[in-house]
Image: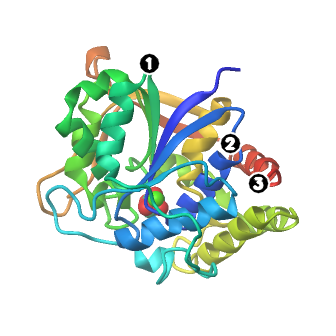
Amino acid sequence: MKRRRLIIDCDPGVDDATALLLAFASPKELDILGVTVVAGNTGLAQTVRNARIIRQIAKREDVPVYAGCARPMVRDIVDAGEFHGESGLGPLPIFEPDAPAAEGHAVDFIVRTLMAADEKVTLAVTGPATNVAMALVLEPRIAAKIAHIVVMGGARSAGGNITASAEFNIFADPHAAHVMLTAGCQVTMFGLDATYQVLTTPARVTALEAVATEAARASALLMRFSNELEVKPPRRAGSPLHDPCTIAWLLKSDLFVVSGAKVSVETNAGLAFGHTAVEFRADADEVNANWVIQADGQGVFDLIVDRLGRL
Ligand code: RIB
Ligand code: CA
């Protein structure tokens, strides 16, 4: 099988951490050119450090980590500390990783890497899309060098998780999401409608805890932390595993069902700020994303257990 060349843009983030571990554990399928980091769940200094911590746990210091944008394109900065804890990695022991971040800005790395690529590169975006959008603004020609963007963000019938109508990644930088969704790239979009079908139930976390690797133990610890937050309505059977769905799709797309849609982002301030309007009745030439409508939660977990056992 041909390896997919990939840049992961993230804001670790308890669920970003499992997404990174899953990707790091899949070198046969994924040629990770770099991890680019953005402010989101917590501030940029922490998200960069956290990405380096996860990289060290996965023993993948061969993959460079680049610091990116410290704030959204237009709106004021927001974070999701209530879901990710003080450090951004919940209860995970925090340490200064051995390997530093790479020199240079993440946006420059994205532009430089895509422009020099002799074959198209896939982007996995699991935080606010600021880095990706800024790269598209800086050098619009990179759009033609992007094979696919698989992004976690948005919500349709599930409603919002940071406001009544907005999902965090889009809410945190709606202007960036708009730039990314109107660049003409192939996009597969995991909104909350899909990720709410992939829950870290206690039985699944227990299965992961039984895997004797540091990566599996770390991921299970983060999931248990997230589950402790599931005490408010609607009290699901576990917390939704948002970001790893993007990597699971790259590895096993048959775990998911998608439907073409026109996805638009509300960028005007007000109650619906950051809302994603997902229109399945769009004409073919209006479709700008494949919206994920179905996810095999157990299949995603089986994949995570299998791969994290290899690290
Ligand atoms: O709404 C879920 C998204 O917001 C995930 O990417 C999570 O890490 C947070 O960034
Ligand atoms: Ca994230």
Q: How crowded is mark 3: few (under 14 residues within 10 Å), some or many (20 or more)?
A: many
Report if residue 280 is visible in the image: no
CA gap between label 2 and label 1 equals: 34 Å
Q: In this view, does 41 lie above or below 125?
A: below
SS label for mark 1: loop
**Which of the image's four quarters has the C terminus?**
bottom right
Determine which of the numbered discs, if any, sits on residue 101 in the image. Answer: none
Graded by Cα atoms within 10 Å as few (under 14), some (14 to 19) or many (20 or more), the crowding at tag 1 reads few
Left or right of 47 in this view: 242: right
- Rendering colour mode: rainbow
Residue found at x 35% / y 43%? 109
Query: Left of 149 or right of it: where is 270?
Result: left
Mark 2 in CB contact with mark 1 (< 8 angstroms)? no
Q: Residue at x 53, y 70 (%)?
A: 234
Residue on which disc 3 sits:
308
Q: Mark 2: which amino acid?
A: Asp
Name the residue type under label 3: Leu
- Label 2 belongs to which residue? 296
Q: Image quarter for residue 289?
A: top left
Q: Which amino acid does label 1 sit on?
A: Asp
Instruction: Tell me how far mark 1 sits from mark 3, CA to CA.
Output: 31 Å
Q: Residue at x 58, y 31 (%)?
A: 257
Distance in Å between CA atoms under marks 2 and 3: 18 Å
Label 1 near ligand 2 (CB < 8 Å): no
The mark that comes first in sequence, 1 or 3, is: 1
> Judging from the image, what secondary structure is the residue with disc 2 in?
loop
Marks 1 and 3 in Cβ contact (< 8 Å): no
What residue is at 59 percent from the left and 58 percent from the top?
A: 241
- Along the polypeptide, which appears first: circle 2 or circle 3? 2
Q: Where is residue 299 in the image (x, y as percent from the top left)?
A: 74, 43
Q: Which residue position is annotated with label 1?
A: 118
